Amino acid sequence: MALVPIDVSVKTVDLVADLETIRHIKRAARQALKEDYFQVLRYELAKLASELQFTKVELLLSTFPEAMKSAAALIDKGKTDEAKVVLYTALNTLVISEERIPLPILRAQALIAQAKTDDASNEDKKKEVLELLDNAEYQLIMAEELGYGDRDREYEELNKTIKELKKSVKDDGDSQALFEKFKTKLADFKKRIAS
């Protein structure tokens, strides 16, 4: 299906909150649902987003050849108004797609990339790398609390890998292979949950 991009928009929705605040919002949403307060529910659920939202509007090219033939035939018959309608209809055949990328996952990726490049050979740098790993772990917990992806094994695996990374850094081990493994897992996870 051949598409021509007409418009692309990017919107950032960023929730600045701690885990307890997120849990409070979730409790309020559950209560609103339980009591059939759907507008309150909608308001509470809207708060539970921390993401980049990409909206792409594209024109479906496959509709044009047939529309052009039909419009030309109508013009030959002197029916220009009808030809305009046919062309206008073809021009309004739009495909709208949306993709959402969770900001906590993006932040975790950036933190892991930074931790990987830092040399943890001295104690100060080791402390910085461990802080970066702690922050990446927190971002993953936040992503899970916000409902990005399923509360599944994948979060468990990611958190387990971060713990392995921390242990390796603390023990002065060679962490590069673990960093690569984690980066790959996290990239695959982001790709899977981005909708």
Image (spheres, rainbow, N blue to C red):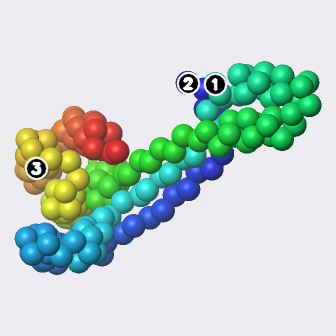
Q: Is residue 120 visible?
A: no
Q: Nearer the viewer, residue 167 or 26?
A: 26
Q: Nearer the viewer, residue 126 or 180?
A: 180
| Mark 2, secondary structure of its residue | loop
| Mark 1, secondary structure of its residue | helix
Tell which tag, 1 or 2, sits nearer the viewer: 1
Screen quadrant of the N terminus: top right
Q: Which residue is mark 3?
A: 151
* CA distance separating discs 1 and 2: 7 Å
Among numbered discs 1 and 2, the one appearing first in the sequence: 2
User: Is the Cβ of the residue at disc 1 closer than 8 Å to that at disc 2?
Assistant: yes
Say what amino acid the circle numbered 3 marks.
Arg
Q: Is residue 90 left or right of residue 168?
A: right
Q: Position of residue 174 (x, y in %)?
A: 18, 40
Q: Which label is found at residue 1? A: 2
Q: Is residue 145 visible?
A: yes
Q: Which label is found at residue 62? A: 1
* CA distance separating discs 3 and 2: 35 Å
Tell which tag, 3 or 2, sits nearer the viewer: 2
| Above or below: residue 98 compared with residue 26 | above
